[in-house]
Image: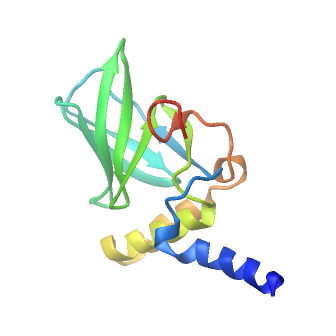
Amino acid sequence: MRHILGPAVLAVSLIVPGAVLAASNSALPYTLSSPPTSLSNSSFSASFGGVQGTITTTSSGRWMMTVAGQTFASGTYMCSGGVCTFTGTMLLGKTVTFTMTATTGTISGLFATHGAWVSALAQWANTHLSGQEIGRVVSAAARIEGSLASGGQEHGSRDGHGRP
């Protein structure tokens, strides 16, 4: 019985949307291409968890990442000394907290496994995107592998204070 229960629990944790916001060692890479150096109205390309999008910032300190015109993530940002820190408060329509403190890095602790990330993203894509965009976005997230998808070096944190 124990041998059957273990795989069943693993399978459920990969597909149940509520199971994705658990602490873990799974890491999602991010890249911010030419972010602003001060509070400003701007747009720049970014990727999060393998998904490409556009981040738009406001001079009042808010940011939003869109993918194929749909809101993917959002939050606030602040700048000091020519460097901006982006704090996320929403990802895939769910309230979460994460911080991006450099132009590239990884964020751990948002999803229990890489499979949980891909599953949650697929659910979001199926309700927000259409046609080939769904496959493109989900495939991009599924392709991240190795240390980035399984707990590589962390350059961001879940709560913005260095705590996962």
Residue at 69%, 52% in the rendered image: 150
Residue 15 in sight here: yes
Indicate the quadrant containing the C terminus: top left, top right, bottom left or bottom right. top right
| 38 or 99: nearer the viewer | 99
Residue at 67%, 77% in the rendered image: 9
* Residue 39 location (% of width, % of height): 24, 24
The image shows residue 131, relative to residue 68, as above or below, that is below
The image shows residue 68, relative to residue 39, as above or below, that is below
* Residue 141 location (% of width, % of height): 54, 61
* Residue 84 location (% of width, % of height): 36, 25
Residue at 57%, 33% in the rendered image: 155
- Identify the residue at the far front of this view: 1
- Identify the residue at the far top of this view: 81
| 135 or 20: nearer the viewer | 20
Query: As drawn, is 150 to the left or to the right of 82?
Result: right
Query: Splitting the image into 4 quarters, where does residue 134 fall?
Result: bottom left
Query: As drawn, is 115 to the left or to the right of 130?
Result: right
| 110 or 114: nearer the viewer | 110
Residue at 75%, 77% in the rendered image: 6
Query: As drawn, is 155 to the left or to the right of 17?
Result: right
* Residue 49 location (% of width, % of height): 52, 53
The image shows residue 102, relative to residue 122, as above or below, that is above
Indicate the quadrant containing the N terminus: top left, top right, bottom left or bottom right. bottom right
